[in-house]
Image (cartoon, rainbow, N blue to C red):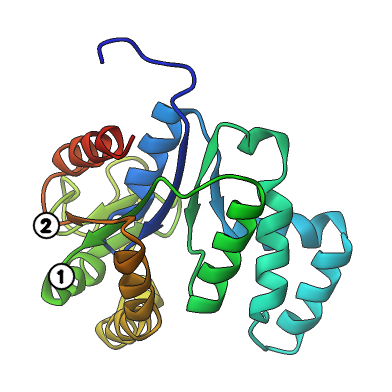
Amino acid sequence: RGTQRRDEMLRAVLLGPPGAGKGTQAVRLVEKYEIPHISTGDIFRKNIKEGTELGKKAQEYMNAGALVPDELVVDLVKDRLQQDDCKNGFLLDGFPRTIFQAEKLDEFLSESNLKMDIVINLQVEKEALIKRLTGRRVCKDCGASYHIVNIPPKKEGVCDICGGELIQRKDDNIETVENRINVYEEQTAPLIGYYKEAGSLVDFDGEASLDEVFDAIVQAIGEQE
């Protein structure tokens, strides 16, 4: 398997609680497999900006402070997956969030004679997530990110780059963090069961180093073929 095949397609879903390191792994996977990273937030913003029919509908719900309904989210994602850059695959992040969405995604793929290659599930203990998320600090001037344990600044509370003050974002305080993790667990636990049953879910230890996690994912993708 030494040669890189150009037909090395990858259709994958990325699951993992807030703070599990999904963002970092997504960037590396997208680069390696030359596929688009698709997140529902990006799709919403693009459709709203371009004033598409689906975008207008989504905007109405968001303006009313309501969740965008599953059917509309599915339509937006299906529309995105039919674009040219998804021919060699895609990495879905933040979708599906519900069993309904997962079933609709499976229906869409099977109608297109495609299948999901792998569902990547990053697992991190709750205590470790809380430590990771509450330890984040951001420079209020230039936006650079730090972590009091993993990426500390040279001088406590001061940005290495511009000397600005480092602050904790509101959504990184312990109550908000615990709530975000609980919501994720409630929403996503059924999905994990769904994909386990389908045989496409692979668990990864999100507490290992970034390189170890990435290498394990690439190896698992190779074994799925």
Q: Secondary structure at mark 2?
A: loop
Whether label 1 touches label 2, CB < 8 Å: yes
Q: Secondary structure at mark 1?
A: helix
Residue at screen point 17% across, 65% down: 124
Amino acid carrying label 1: it is Lys
Residue at screen point 37% across, 14% down: 4
Residue receiving disc 2: 149
Residue 22 versus residue 214 in the image, above or below: below
Amino acid carrying label 2: it is Val
Q: Nearer the viewer, residue 184 or 179?
A: 184
Residue receiving disc 1: 131
Give the x, y percent position of residue 21: 28, 54
In the drawing, does residue 195 fall left or right of residue 223?
right
User: Can I make out residue 203 in this image?
Assistant: yes
Q: Residues within 10 Å of mark 1 (few under 14, many from 20)?
A: some
* Residue 45 quadrant: bottom right
